Amino acid sequence: MKYVENARVVSTEFLQKGICNLVLECPKIAKDAKPGQFIEIYPDNGVNLLSRPISICGIDVVVGNIRVVFQVVGKGTDIFSKLKKGDKVRVLGPCGNGYTLNDGTALLVGGGIGVPPLLETAKRLDCKSKIAVLGFRSNPFLVNEFARVCDRVYVTTDDGSEGFKGNVVQLMEKENLTADMIYSCGPKIMLKFLSEYAMKNNIPCQVSMEERMACGIGACVGCVVEIKEGDGTTYKKVCKDGPVFDCKEVVW
C-alpha cells in the first residue's frame, strides 16, 4: 500500500561532492517498505516541479525512518540536498516492486547511484554468503557500510583510482564469481552485460531498471521497458511493474 506523508527531515549530509544522504521520518512508508522499492519526493510539495523517484537505501521500522542516497543532478535534487533538520517534505511511497529475497548465496552488483538500494537488500538477506561488487567512475561511497554486512566486497573504478580498474562484469569474470542469485541495480548498459554474464553462468539475476519517471504510479506511461512475453514482447511500467525484473524478461 502506498502512503502520502508530510515527512520530517531527520538529517541531510553529503557523503562526498554531489552525493547526498537524506533521512526522512515517514513511519507509514517505513513500515511497509521493502528492499528495491523507491519513494517519490516532491521538491516544492508538487506545486511547480514533478516529484523525483529515489531508491530506498535504508529502512528503520523501529523509529520510522527512510534513508535515501542520491546524486545532485538538477533543480529537484538540489532542493533536497539543501533541506535542514526539521523541514517537512511531501513523500509518496513505498513505490514499485522490490527484490525477491531468498536464502541462497548472493551477489549484490551495483553501479554508481545504483549502489545505495543494494545496502538495505544486503542487510535483509539471511543467507550463507553475501558478496558485493560495487562499481564507480571514481570516488567510491558506502563501501564501509557494505563491508559491515557482507562477507566480501569488491570495488571497481573506471579510472583505477581505487580497487579494480574496469567495470563490475570484468571483475566478476576475473574472479569467476558465482552465486545462487544476483541482485543488481545500475545503468542499463551495465545491467545488459551483467545479464549476459548471469545467463552464461546459469545464475538467476534480478535487475532494477533505472528509467526516467514522472508520476511514479503508472499513470503517465513515461517509464516503460520492453519485456518478453510469449512469442513476442510487451511494454511494462518500471514504476509500477518494476523497477525490479528478471534479467531474462528484459529485451536488451
Image (spheres, rainbow, N blue to C red):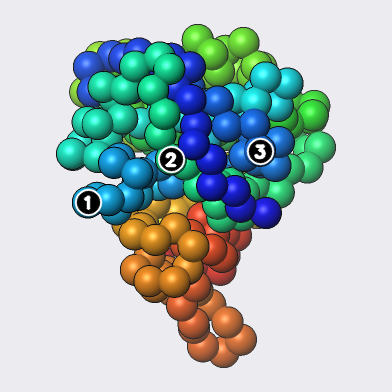
First in residue order: circle 3 vs circle 1: 3
What is the x, y in percent for residue 164?
36, 21
Three-letter code for the amino acid on which mark 1 is drawn: Asn
Residue at numbered disc 3: 28
Task: Give SS at disc 3.
Answer: helix
Residue at numbered disc 2: 90
Which residue is pictured at 53% across the width and 40% down the height? 5
Residue at numbered disc 1: 48
Mark 3 surroundings: few (<14), some (14-19) or many (≥20) residues within 10 A: some
Asked if the residue at tag 1 contacts the one at tag 3, i.e. Cβ–Cβ closer than 8 Å, the answer is no
Task: Give SS at disc 1.
Answer: loop
Mark 2 surroundings: few (<14), some (14-19) or many (≥20) residues within 10 A: some
First in residue order: circle 2 vs circle 3: 3
Q: Quadrant of residue 156?
A: top left
Answer whether residue 85 is visible to the viewer in this image.
yes
Give the left or right position of residue 178, taking residue 239 as reference. right
Separation of residues labelled 3 and 1 (CA atoms): 26 Å
Separation of residues labelled 2 and 1 (CA atoms): 13 Å
Q: Quadrant of residue 230?
A: bottom right
Q: Nearer the viewer, residue 40 or 191?
A: 40
Three-letter code for the amino acid on which mark 2 is drawn: Arg
Q: Nearer the viewer, residue 234 or 91?
A: 91
Residue 98 is labelled as none
Q: Quadrant of residue 78?
A: top left
What is the x, y in percent for residue 133?
50, 28
What is the x, y in percent for residue 147?
57, 12
What is the x, y in percent for residue 64?
65, 26
Question: Quarter of the image containing the N terminus?
Answer: bottom right
